[in-house]
Image (spheres, grey):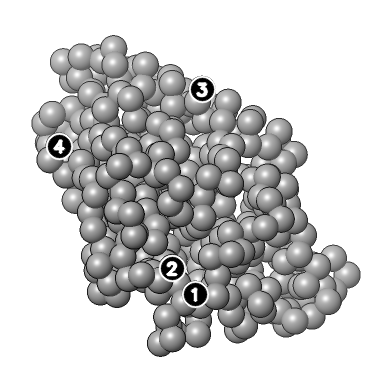
Amino acid sequence: MARVYNFSAGPSMLPLEVLQTAQKELIEFGDSGMSVMEMSHRSPVYDAIIKETEANFRKLMDIPDNYKVLFLQGGASTQFAAVPLNLMKTGKADYVVSGQFSGKAFKEAKKYGDAKCIATSEDKTFSYIPEITPDMVREDADYVHVCYNNTIFGTKFPEVPNVGDKVLVADMSSCITSEPVDVTKFGVIYAGAQKNMAPAGLTVVIIREDLMGNAREDIPTMLDYKTMADNDSMYNTPPCYAIYIAGLVYKWALANGGLEAMKERNEKKANILYDFLDNSTLFKATADKKCRSMMNVCFVTGDADLDKKFCKEAAEAGFVNLKGHRSVGGMRASIYNAMPYEGVEKLVEFMAEFEKNNK
Ligand SMILES: *Cc1c(COP(=O)(O)O)cnc(C)c1O
């Protein structure tokens, strides 16, 4: 077996133990006589899988009882529309634009009401997180939307933004389950699962119960949080297999110490990489120090040809998918929960060697 160190931003690597369990259970799950892929989502055996998955996710994220967990489809991008369609009661919402995905969310919300960008870091190519204070939020806005970890630019909110008593909505696609978060500070948290939790096809929404039931009349049924909650995410066929894998990932995270332990591991991984970058004469980290992401580490040499050479040689050495997003270039190492410490340590060794050879 020759598994590489996969630094893809998403879909991204899964814990090897999870893949091994899935392999063992691929053809027959338990004594059901069939694969999870072949089961009716309404069968008792699948019902037990989805219930256990939700229970473990709740335990992992410490989700209070007054929040619903929804297992949906359509990716985080569908939530860009679902959020305003469900939550814009007065027709107003405030957005922080700190990267490409939050820009897309803002643009989508503008279709449905008076969405306002209250802060942006576009002036410096989204290399920092703008400061948010409660007085920036409009009094009659229904919610404030942020992207908590900017996957493309490698920045993260250093703390939960203070929006006073407004409902805070967060896209956590690329940082969910990377560290503990106080769910009670948010009205809605959503995430495409393919970064840190599962294969593509599953979108997880955590929503405070009192925020449901106010959707626009003309909302597509499939986007209505209340419909999905009332039907336990089974209004239609859910992404059954991706939910099953997410369940294995949650079990893996719990068995490995939960989110406190994930945070410790992730900090340790991010620190060796950032420390190397800060001391390098060739490579340079691009994100502002105060808001660096633990999950997506962006860096450049300053020379596009050298960046290309680096990515090519790294791939040959078994470190793949280090090319930065097509919109920004440079390099990006996505080091989600499943990336072992050893992977980052070896990458740093490789980078030091490359630096020596390219002075
Ligand atoms: C990947 C990503 C998205 C887009 O997710 P899809 O599931 O492809 O729609 C949105 N927001 C963030 C922060 C992401 O990292």
Question: Which residue is tagged 1?
Answer: 214
| Distance CA(mark 1)–CA(mark 3) | 43 Å
Marks 2 and 1 in Cβ contact (< 8 Å): yes
Q: Split into 4 quadrants, where in the image is the C terminus?
A: top left
Q: Give the residue at x 23% y 24%.
A: 284
| Distance CA(mark 2)–CA(mark 1) | 7 Å
Marks 1 and 3 in Cβ contact (< 8 Å): no
Q: Earlier in the sequence, mark 2 or mark 3?
A: 2
Q: Is mark 2 within 8 Å of ligand 1?
A: no
Question: Which residue is tagged 2?
Answer: 87
Left or right, residue 358 beside residue 255: left
- Residue 270 placed where, x, y %? 44, 27
- Which amino acid, mark 4? Lys
Q: In the structure shown, which secondary structural element does the residue marked by tag 1 occupy?
A: loop
**Viewer-nearest residue: 123 or 162:** 162
Question: Which residue is tagged 3?
Answer: 268
Label 4: how many Cα within 10 Å (few below 14, some 14–19, many 20+):
few
Q: Earlier in the sequence, mark 2 or mark 1?
A: 2
Q: Earlier in the sequence, mark 4 or mark 3?
A: 4
- Which amino acid, mark 2? Leu
Q: Inspect this view and state whether residue 238 appears.
A: no
User: Depth-wise, is mark 4 or mark 1 nearer the camera?
Assistant: 1
Question: Which residue is tagged 4?
Answer: 124
User: Depth-wise, is mark 1 or mark 3 nearer the camera?
Assistant: 1
User: Depth-wise, is mark 4 or mark 2 nearer the camera?
Assistant: 2
